[in-house]
Image (cartoon, grey):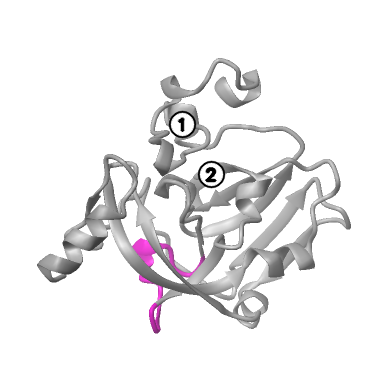
Amino acid sequence: MAADTRRQAQASLPPGQVVAQDWGALHYGPVPTFRPQRWDLRIHGSTGDGDVRLSWDDVDSLPRVGLVADFHCVTRLTVPAVDWSGVSVATIVDLCPPDGEATHVMVWGEYGYSANLRMVDFLADTTLLATHRGAHRLEPEHGHPLRLVVPHLYGYKSVKWVREIEYLRADRRGFWEERGYHNRADPWSEQRYAYQEEPSEPPSAREP
């Protein structure tokens, strides 16, 4: 990235962030092996019309949309203007809508990794189930075949290797949230750690 472009990107970042020098990969556990004939995506929990299970062929045939957005890691690194494409959350919700009492979502990846989201964050126009970066399929270490992208929150909410979407009627902490990271994860408010959560938040949002 040229110096002028880097300075411009730095000026538009959330507080405490710096522009990343490269596109590194951070994740919990090993990189899973993708076996398309055995892979599926399950949508369940507080659904309006019952659970849905999609094969890889089902997911891969859904309409693809694009998104360019900065990606903010809680480690204080930001990758600017990442070019994602994949399945919009609106498409998934059309296939399996939550019922009227669902307030949150737990997104599950391989090996039990999870991240919780408010329904409003999950349904944001910029939330995407990505299959590609640029013109190419995601690399395995970046979440191939399917990863959640929630660019308005820190990266630990953008679950790699997605296998389940669970609609919830009450909040429940995910993997890193149980280990001391902020339940909401808004980069513009620097919501990095659980100790920063407001006492006025409901106990379900503050306690594992």
Q: Is residue 95 magenta?
A: no
For residue 129, side relative to residue 45 (left or right): left
Residue that appears at 68% across and 77% down: 58
Confirm or deny contact between disc 2 and disc 1 (CB under 8 A).
no
Query: Label 2 vs label 1: CA separation?
Result: 14 Å
Residue 142 rendering spot, x and y as whole percentages: 37, 63
Q: Does label 2 or label 1 sit earlier along the sequence?
A: 2
Identify the secondary structure beneath mark 1.
loop
Q: Amino acid at mark 2?
A: Ser
CA neighbours of label 2 inside 10 A, class few (<14), some (14 to 19), many (20+): many
Residue that appears at 61% across and 74% down: 56
For residue 125, side relative to residue 76 (left or right): right
Residue that appears at 78% across and 61% down: 96
Image-quadrant location for residue 42: bottom right
Q: On the image, numbered disc 2 is attached to which residue? A: 114
Question: Extreme right residue here?
Answer: 49
Q: Which residues are magenta?
A: 134-146
Q: On the image, numbered disc 1 is attached to which residue? A: 182
For residue 190, side relative to residue 85 (left or right): left
